[in-house]
């Protein structure tokens, strides 16, 4: 008998995978460093990070915390605020 798949877990895995692809593509396009170098060398409110965060929020349902960690934005409040400001601009 096949195991039941938890739809929430599948959605979570899909969103994380999709988000990783979006972030990696954005970093590659703008020739930005990946990993720890991203947090150390590029400021939290960098417009490129904000653009990646906005696309990620629009196309997936990952949390602001996940996006913040992925983009080296320290915590989720900058993500929420900067995404809101970026959409207004």
Image (cartoon, rainbow, N blue to C red):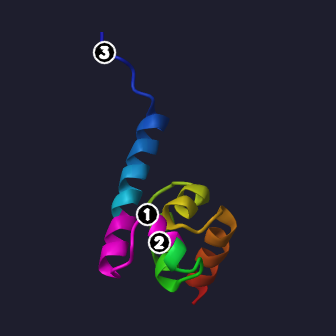
Say which residue appears at 59% left-offset and 75% top-offset.
83
Q: Is residue 32 magenta?
A: yes
Q: Spatial distance from mark 3 to mark 2, Cα to Cα?
A: 42 Å
Say which residue appears at 45% left-offset and 29% top-offset.
6
Residue 30 versus residue 17: which sits nearer the camera? 30
Using the image, determine if residue 87 lies above or below residue 34. Answer: below
Q: Is residue 43 left or right of residue 5?
A: right
Residue 75 image position (x, y, % from top left) = 65, 63
Say which residue appears at 51% left-offset and 79% top-offset.
42
For label 3, count other residues whose C-alpha is less than 10 Å away and answer few (under 14), some (14-19) or many (20+).
few
Label 3 element class: loop
Label 1 element class: loop
Q: Spatial distance from mark 1 to mark 3, Cα to Cα?
A: 38 Å
Residue 78 image position (x, y, % from top left) = 66, 72
Residue 63 versus residue 29: which sits nearer the camera? 29
> Which residues make up the magenta segment?
22-39
Using the image, determine if residue 46 lies above or below residue 73. Answer: below
Label 2 element class: helix
Residue 71 image position (x, y, % from top left) = 50, 67
Which residue is situated farthest in the bottom direction here? Answer: 89
Res 53 label: none
Res 38 label: 2
Contact between labelled residues 1 and 2, with CB atoms less than 8 Å apart: yes
Label 3 vs 2, first from the N-terminus: 3
Q: Is residue 64 magenta?
A: no
Q: Which residue is mark 1?
A: 35
For label 1, count other residues whose C-alpha is less than 10 Å away and answer few (under 14), some (14-19) or many (20+).
few
Say which residue appears at 67% left-offset and 75% top-offset.
81
Q: Which residue is mark 3?
A: 2
Q: Is residue 82 left or right of residue 39?
A: right
For label 2, count other residues whose C-alpha is less than 10 Å away and answer few (under 14), some (14-19) or many (20+).
some
Q: Spatial distance from mark 2 to mark 1, Cα to Cα?
A: 6 Å
């Amino acid at each position: 008998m096949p195991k039941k798949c938890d739809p929430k877990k599948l959605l979570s895995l899909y969103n994380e995978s999709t988000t990783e692809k979006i972030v990696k593509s954005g970093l590659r396009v703008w020739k930005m460093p990946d990993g720890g170098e991203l947090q150390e060398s590029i400021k939290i409110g960098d417009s490129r990070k904000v653009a990646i965060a906005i696309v990620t929020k629009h196309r997936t349902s990952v949390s602001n915390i996940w996006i913040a960690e992925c983009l080296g934005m320290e915590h989720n409040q900058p993500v929420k605020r900067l995404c809101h400001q970026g959409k207004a601009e």
